[in-house]
């Protein structure tokens, strides 16, 4: 079974303020996305930036076979949300947005406004086949792209840039705790027995503090001396599959010419033991040649084909 995660980048039907300007651009984007999915052949694909649920239905209709669309009911201010595109039925077990107990609201702008929920919902489904039974979680944490009052994407000065960078980081950190709290619930005290996978655009790299929050007890990451020595922390840990991705593939986006891995798959120990390989992109698909993106208004790429992210995937086998 191939499982993966992919930010589809501004998946809207044409005609609105964020999607493609015309039908031709829309159909070109859908065809590019469908080609990548067909080449990858995932059974479970976690998706982000679904702006129009009907657009994901349109994409699913281009794929061979029967596909199921499952979406969070908690979109952000632009209407984008997370979900799953699967070739097998799944059922929803949670759709969360509120910060966990005891985590206070965080400041979001200079006005002092605070938020107490994730900008986009965190969705969990159960995947069940003859070979596998696991819970899958998809999230899309707060972007590092900063926006300012009045719809600006450039600050008035460096003080404003620093403040809004802090607001965004605080929000992303709080959102990571929403994901981790849900993972704890699904692990049920023992991730060696209860299989859980967390997928998503974390908007940060492997070593970032926000990404590390999702791992649980430290000291046992893949490639460290502790990995081959199980301990009591394994019951609560999640492992990032990033080290299993070949080094030349270890990126899912190109920002200002720099390759970065900001899309991730994390797994409990029981599921991790079934991973046979991992990678990014799909051979022969358009996502193999990612564009370099900058810190700019997302609407700049509204007519772009495909996505500015590559899918991240793992192959699991009993």
Image: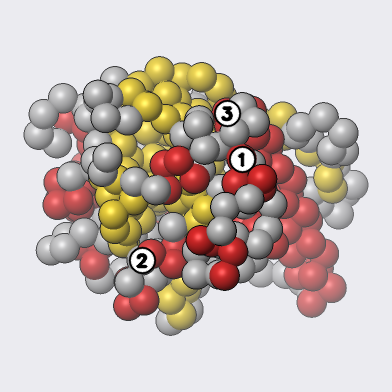
Tally the marks: 3
Q: Residue at x 36, y 56 (%)?
A: 312
How far is mark 3 from mark 1, CA to CA?
12 Å
Query: Quick one: SS at disc 1?
Result: helix
Label 3 Cα neighbours within 10 Å, binned few <14 / some 14-19 / many ≥20: many
Cβ atoms at labels 2 and 3 below 8 Å apart: no
Residue 102 position, x and y percent, is 87, 33
Q: Residue at x 76, y 32 (%)?
A: 100
Q: Nearer the viewer, residue 300 or 131?
A: 131
Q: Residue at x 73, y 58 (%)?
A: 169
Q: Quadrant of residue 58?
A: top left
Q: Which residue is mark 2?
A: 245
Residue 8's disc is none
Q: Nearer the viewer, residue 247 or 160?
A: 247
Q: Which residue is mark 1?
A: 235
Report the side of 279 relative to 73 (left or right).
Answer: left
Residue 186's disc is 3
* Residue 196 visible in the displayed image: no
Residue 45 position, x and y percent, is 33, 40
Residue 31 position (above or below residue 296): above
Which quadrant is home to the N terminus?
Answer: top left
Query: Quick one: SS at disc 3?
Result: helix
């Amino acid at each position: 079974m191939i499982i993966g995660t992919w930010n589809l980048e501004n998946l809207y039907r044409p005609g609105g303020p964020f999607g493609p300007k015309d039908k031709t651009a829309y159909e070109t984007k859908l065809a590019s996305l469908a080609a990548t999915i067909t080449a990858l052949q995932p059974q479970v694909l976690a998706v982000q930036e679904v702006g129009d649920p009907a657009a994901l239905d349109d994409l699913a209709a281009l794929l061979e076979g029967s596909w199921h669309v499952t979406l969070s009911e908690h979109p952000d201010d632009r209407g984008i949300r997370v979900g799953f595109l699967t070739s097998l039925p799944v059922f929803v077990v949670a759709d969360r947005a509120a910060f966990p107990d005891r985590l206070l609201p965080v400041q979001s702008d200079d006005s002092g406004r605070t938020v107490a929920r994730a900008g986009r919902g965190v969705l969990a489904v159960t995947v069940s086949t003859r070979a596998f039974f696991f819970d899958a979680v998809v999230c899309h944490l707060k972007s590092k792209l900063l926006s300012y009052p009045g719809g600006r994407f450039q600050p008035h000065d460096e003080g404003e840039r620093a403040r809004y960078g802090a607001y965004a980081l605080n929000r992303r950190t709080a959102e990571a705790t929403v994901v981790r709290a849900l993972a704890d619930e699904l692990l049920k005290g023992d991730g060696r027995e209860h299989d859980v996978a967390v997928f998503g655009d974390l908007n940060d790299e492997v070593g970032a503090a926000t990404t590390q929050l999702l791992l649980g007890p430290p000291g046992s990451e893949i490639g460290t001396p502790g990995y081959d020595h199980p301990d009591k922390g394994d019951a609560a840990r999640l492992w990032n599959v990033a080290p299993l991705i070949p080094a030349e593939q270890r990126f899912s986006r190109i920002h200002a010419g720099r390759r970065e891995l900001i899309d991730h798959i994390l797994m409990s120990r029981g599921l991790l033991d079934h991973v046979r390989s991992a990678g990014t992109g799909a051979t022969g698909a358009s996502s193999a040649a990612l564009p370099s993106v900058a810190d700019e208004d997302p609407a700049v790429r509204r007519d772009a084909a495909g996505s500015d992210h590559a899918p991240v995937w793992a192959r699991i086998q009993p």
